[in-house]
Amino acid sequence: MQPCQNCQAVIDEYLLDKQLEPLRDLTVDDFNVCADCTTVVADACVECGGAVYVPRSETRTPDVCPACRSDLIERTGRDPGWMVTT
């Protein structure tokens, strides 16, 4: 078990997996934060309409989910970032 990079608490993989269910193709292994330090916002991705992962330290909700961001990087060869809209 690894510590949360935000609060240093031990990551409860069961709780985090449950919280990450709306995010396609991602597991607890893709994150270094605990369930208390993250928020998942359903239906917020501008690409697929799926959920986005929001660290509690962020003040804005990202526009692109991690899977779509990865797809965009693979297709275009450049990183669009999390906030594609202005």
Image (spheres, rainbow, N blue to C red):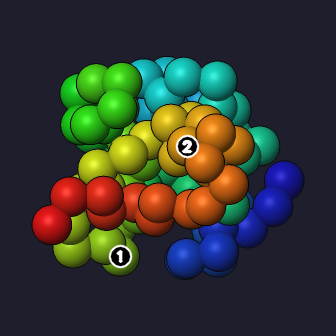
Q: Residues within 10 Å of mark 2 (few under 14, many from 20)?
A: some
Kindly state the secondary structure of the residue where label 2 is placed: helix
Quick one: 48 or 52, which is closer to the camera? 48
Q: Amino acid at mark 2?
A: Leu
- The answer to whether one can see residue 31 in this image is no
User: In the image, is 28 to the left or to the right of 61?
Assistant: right
* Image x and y of residue 52, in percent: 37, 41
Marks 1/2 in contact by CB < 8 Å: the verdict is: no
Q: Residues within 10 Å of mark 1 (few under 14, many from 20)?
A: few
Q: Going by the picture, which residue comes out furthest to the right?
A: 1
* Residue 35 sits above or below residue 83 on the image: above
Residue 9 in the image: state x and y as whole percent. Answer: 63, 68
Name the residue located 15 percent from the left edge and 66 percent from the top edge: 86
Q: Secondary structure at mark 1?
A: loop
Residue 81 pos. (x, y %): 46, 64
Q: How many marks do you count on the picture? A: 2
Camera-side residue of 79 and 14: 79
User: What's the residue at 35%, 76% (across, down)?
Assistant: 57
Q: Which mark is residue 85?
A: none
Up the image or down, 48 lies above or below 59; here it is above
Q: Does residue 16 sit above or below 49 in this rendering?
A: below
Q: Which mark is residue 72?
A: 2
Which residue is painted at 64% across and 31% down in the image?
26
Three-letter amino acid code at disc 1?
Answer: Ser
Residue tagged 1: 57
Q: Nearer the viewer, residue 22 or 74?
A: 74
Place of residue 19 in the rendered image (x, y in percent of width and height, measured from the top left): 45, 33
32 vs 73, nearest the viewer: 73
Earlier in the chain: of badge 1 and badge 2, it is: 1
